[in-house]
Image (tube, grey):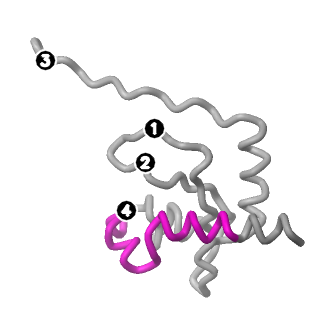
Amino acid sequence: MQGMESKVMAKAKPPTAKQRKLWDRIVSLGCILQLGSCWGRITIHHCGTGGGGRKDHDKVIPLCWAHHLGPLGIDGKAMSKRAWQERYGTETILLETTQSLLRSEDHE
């Protein structure tokens, strides 16, 4: 549109080697939802990036394909992000759970 500024979305920086190493640990936890409806490989979901926000590579949770991108997924098309969080818990709570599990591993 002429005369209007176009919004250019900043591209997220790629994760660092340290972040990727942490992701490997996070993925090894399995799907954070730990439900019988889990299936598919474990993937990384970036929390709090709704509305085109920049991805924070440190705020991630492990989700199976079904709960990430599949028919039960937060980033799938079957349900809204709000409905997903009402059903499974907020990203904030799931992120805190993930971080707690990582801390527990560090103390073993």
Q: Position of residue 108 (x, y in %)?
A: 89, 72
**Residue 49 disc label:** 2
**Residue 92 disc label:** none
The residue that mark 3 highlights is 4
Q: Position of residue 67 (x, y in %)?
A: 53, 70
Task: Let me know if residue 79 is in the magenta part.
Answer: yes
Separation of marks 2 and 4 at Cα, in angstroms:
16 Å
What span is in magenta?
Answer: 77-100
- Disc 2 crowd rating (10 Å Cα; few below 14, some 14-19, many 20+) is few
Q: Secondary structure at mark 2?
A: loop
Q: Quick one: label 2 or label 4, which is nearer the N terminus?
A: 2
Q: Position of residue 42 (x, y in %)?
A: 67, 63
Q: Amino acid at mark 1?
A: Arg
Whether the residues at callouts 4 and 3 have beta carbons within 8 Å, the answer is no
Q: Quick one: label 3 or label 2, which is nearer the N terminus?
A: 3
The residue that mark 1 highlights is 54
